[in-house]
Amino acid sequence: MNYWLFKTEPDECSIDDFATAPDTPIVWEGVRNYQARNYLRDDVAVSDEVFIYHSSCKDIGIAGIARVARAAYPDPSQFDSSSIYYDPRSTAENPRWFAVDLVYVSKLPQLIRLDKLKNLATLIELPLVRKGNRLSVMPVTCAQWQTILALS
């Protein structure tokens, strides 16, 4: 099993959205960065666990955990001309973007704030805390996962 951190803006998809319907998979769509896309397409697998990280909001940090319920498939939003994620260069025969489905695991007792993560020497290699990292999908090592869980 692999571990991941997925960034989201909570007004688009928050850990509370997962908790509202814990058995209903949520499509993780709209990734439009090639490196993040490659992680989704090539590395994220069913049963992998994912930290849900709230960004671009008042309270930034890790809010909960989800699990991958369906591995990569063509992101349906790339074909929908009414979607902000529409990509006219994508075709069913040659999709450019991929999505996965996630299901709820748990909400953390309290948000683990970014500044707290940045202050831990054991997380210095976590892509999230490294300067200039803007990826919405990033790997987390098992040791990093355990360190972060211990903070909750």
Image: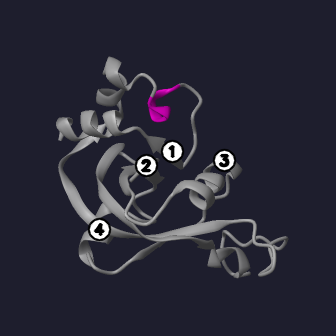
- Mark 4 packing: few (<14 Cα in 10 Å), some, or many (20+)? many
Q: Is residue 22 above or below residue 13?
A: below
Residue at the spot of label 4: 104
Q: Earlier in the sequence, mark 3 or mark 1?
A: 3
Answer whether labels 1 and 2 touch (C-beta < 8 Å). yes
Q: Earlier in the sequence, mark 2 or mark 3?
A: 2
* Numbered-mark total: 4
Residue toward you, 87 or 12: 87
Q: Residue at x 36, y 45 (%)?
A: 58
Compared across the picture, whether 127 is left or right of 123 comes to: right
- Dot 4 falls on a residue whose secondary structure is strand
How far is disc 4 from disc 1 in space, using C-alphas?
19 Å
- Dot 3 falls on a residue whose secondary structure is helix
How far is disc 3 from disc 1 in space, using C-alphas?
9 Å
Identify residue type, mark 1: Met
How far is disc 1 from disc 2 in space, using C-alphas?
6 Å
- Mark 2 packing: few (<14 Cα in 10 Å), some, or many (20+)? many
Q: Which residues are magenta?
A: 126-130
